[in-house]
Image (tube, rainbow, N blue to C red):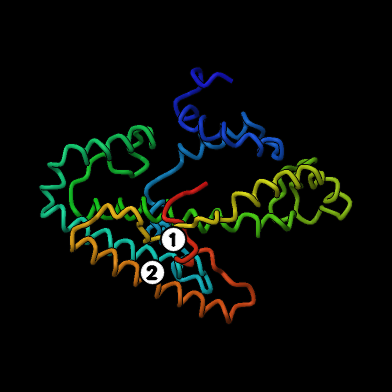
Amino acid sequence: MDPLHLPREEKSVFTAVDLLSPIFQATATGRDGMLKLLAKGVELSNYTSLCLPDDLEERGVSNLPNFYYRDDGMKIWTAIEKFVSGIVDIYYRSDDAVKADPELQAWIHEIFTEAFLSRESSGVPSTLESKAQLSKFLTMVIFNCSARHSAVNSGQFDFAAWMPNTPATLRQPPPTVKGTASLKSILETFPEVNSTCALLSLLSIVSYEPGDLRPLGQYPEKHFTEEMPQKLIFHFQKRLAVISEEIKERNQALPIAYHYLDPSLIQNSVSI
């Protein structure tokens, strides 16, 4: 398939999908089907789903018991938001300073037009009008590229290793009427062993972090050298350390530990 002749929304994910060729051998969609699914995902993506507090409220799970993704995720979101707001306060003294920054406005406009295809229905801002709006957007970016990625990516193998949880493909159409499946029909529908092994081999690679893990909040490059940003980074690291200890303590009492949002195990950014 020639990427030059793809619709815009499919072209935007072409390069990323091209890097995933091993998974096409283990899934029913194949390469072309995966492009269509990802393009549909781009069309449906919205700002609410990317902002954890809004997403939890929208899905009606804000008060769901024993929901550790929410519990741990909100602690991390709040810590990131406080850190980001502090940084924004240092470099932007007023809302007018945000609106008057041409590079900042060009940055958000490019994200709106290229990543979200200029879809106003996505809810993604095309301009930044205030410090609060900037802080929320930056918090969203950092959270999704670190914590949310960890929660989604790191547990893939653990979940998929029990093949019925997420079969790579199906050899027969799924039943359309409840109660009609039998052991024979299930076994005839599940994928072949080699397809499952191919998927698990890939997931075992992407699910485990590399040996050079750089945890969230650790910045060896030291881009910020001024006193106030350094203090904010220090307090951010302390808050993450407390969250990590709280998660470890909670997990000791769980039959199955939920550790995917332990800050000590979260990469600073997407590493896969």
Comparing labels 2 and 1, the label whose residue is closer to the camera: 1
Residue under pointer 2: 240
- Bin the neighbour count of mark 1 within 10 Å (Cα to Cα): few under 14, some 14-19, many 20 and up: some
Taking depth in this image into account, of 229 and 149 the one nearest to the observer is 229
Count the marks: 2
The label number, if any, that marks residue 215 in the structure image: 1
Say which quadrant the N terminus sits in. top right
Q: Residue furthest right?
A: 184
Residue, x 47% and y 60% (percent of image)?
266
Give me the residue at 80% from left, 40% from top.
171
- Image location of residue 105, percent across then percent down: 21, 39
Q: Residue at x 23, y 67 (%)?
A: 231
Query: Pointers 2 and 1 in contact (CB under 8 A)?
Result: yes
Taking depth in this image into account, of 174 and 213 the one nearest to the observer is 213
Please name the amino acid that badge 1 sits on: Pro
Estimate how packed mark 2 is, as few (under 14), some (14 to 19) or many (20 or more) residues with alpha carbons within 10 Å.
many
Q: Does 209 sit left or right of 56 as displayed?
A: right
**Marker disc for residue 8:** none
